[in-house]
Amino acid sequence: MDQSVKFDLDLIHRYDKSGPRYTSYPTALELHYGFTAQDYQQQIKLSNERGGPLSLYFHIPFCDTVCYYCACNKIITKNREHAEPYLANLFKEIEFQGALFDKKRMVNQLHWGGGTPTFLDYEQMSRLMAATRQHFNLKEDDTGEYSIEIDPRATDDKTIKQLRRLGFNRISLGVQDFDPAVQQAVNRIQSEAQTFAVLDAAKKEGFRSTSIDLIYGLPLQTVASFSVTLDKILSVAPDRFSIFNYAHLPARFKTQRQINDADMPNAEVKLDILQMIIRRLLDAGYVYIGMDHFAKPDDELAIAQRENKLYRNFQGYSTHSDCDLIGLGITSIGRVADSYVQNVKDLTAYDALISQGELPVFKGFVLNADDKLRRAVITQLICHFSLSFSDIEQAYTIDFKHYFSSELNALKVMRDDGLLVINDEGIQVLAVGRLLIRNICMIFDAYLKANTEQFSKVI
């Protein structure tokens, strides 16, 4: 498989608009309040009938300092005891949900996100993993994909050893930028020594994968300054990179109002930084997976993409398309059977529902036949940059060219611009179109409104 990518500034300017990231289709905006806990239980029943492995996502919302760029659902506190009531409710939710899923179903994938999961101390983390193991069928060996998001400022070699003991074998580290002025501007002061100590400890403890999160478009960033950060990270050769485009939306996210608008790099500088990032990572031997993800050629993501087995879910690119995803904790989103389901978003509502012995369902969505078909099309394009008409036709008993006649007609402009090739067999996204894959997927989105400003920019 050709996994190259080409940067074309003229095309990027023409196609640079807002659009979904397609961690799901339909997107989370379509989840509605008419979906109830009873609807979720029906989907769980259907999921058990179909069988297959499970994936668990736990949302740990606590951080001890606020990063001004952050748009996540978080609770800022330095008092670790504030996590105790939340954990008590989380343990009950684990029990509630665990009782509904077939205990024989193996948990192939587990992820702790946040917030900052390492806000919890070892005793708290141990109790959380023990409760999970009591009510779900976790693997006893090291063959699962059990990952956790790490804040190097709240982690040391002892913590890494403890996480490995609990069964984690993958970590992702938030770095964002090493430049002191940028760190000061976004209130995330993090030394290189802290970061590299964690990476070194993870390698010594036998973690199978390390991923680094960076953000471009932060205040005071320049091509030169971000290139220095890349130099430092490349010197330790993590397995994966997630390099996100910062969306500055202070009207929506209160903490972003503490960033000085005058310090924000303009659109041209952001594009220059992105072009530099792509060139540097490709020159270093990383494969462009898609969107903002890069991986070493021997990484599971790159292998899955070459073997046409890559998938995308609410945590991003994944190798576990066969797993139903169960969300646990406030604001978490799951995908179970034919539905998406989201938990309530605040501690008070979560506590009230758990105290009543109820599932903390906030809203959800049940996919119809057209949704599933379009999801398959979008997933193939965003994960593999190609689409076989016959594969879709056989799986969904349709005539692709008839069913999607208007979409294929709309793609002709992109074809003429050199983003893709359309022939009798299917669609092939070319190297110049890969950075604009969200635009291509948007053609097949039946829910997309004319106003897409609730989404981030595609570049």
Image (cartoon, helix red, strand yellow):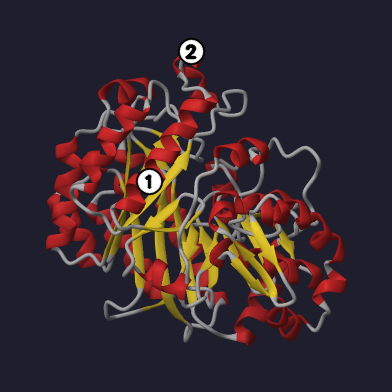
Q: Nearer the viewer, residue 164 or 310?
A: 310
Amino acid type at mark 1: Arg
Q: Nearer the viewer, mark 1 or mark 2?
A: 1
Numbered marks: total: 2
Dot label at residue 432: none
N-terminal-most mark, 1 or 2: 2
Whole-percent x and y of residue 4? 45, 59
Is residue 31 in view from this perspective?
no
Residue sitting at 81 percent across and 41 percent down? 450
- The 10 Å Cα crowd at callout 1, few under 14, some 14 to 19, many 20 or more, is some
Whole-percent x and y of residue 316? 50, 57
Whole-percent x and y of residue 73? 51, 40
Q: What residue is pinned by disc 1?
A: 279
Whole-percent x and y of residue 282? 36, 53
Instruction: Assess whether mark 2 and mark 1 are in contact (beta carbons under 8 angstroms).
Output: no
Q: What residue is pinned by disc 2?
A: 262
Quadrant holding the C terminus? top right
In this rendering, would 367 be left or right of 273?
right
Residue sitting at 33 percent across and 24 percent down? 182
Amino acid type at mark 2: Ala
Q: Is residue 1 above or below residue 293?
A: below
Q: Nearer the viewer, residue 188 or 211?
A: 211
For label 2, the SS is helix
Q: Is residue 93 above or below residue 376?
A: above
In this rendering, would 250 be left or right of 392?
left
Q: Is residue 257 above or below residue 87?
A: above
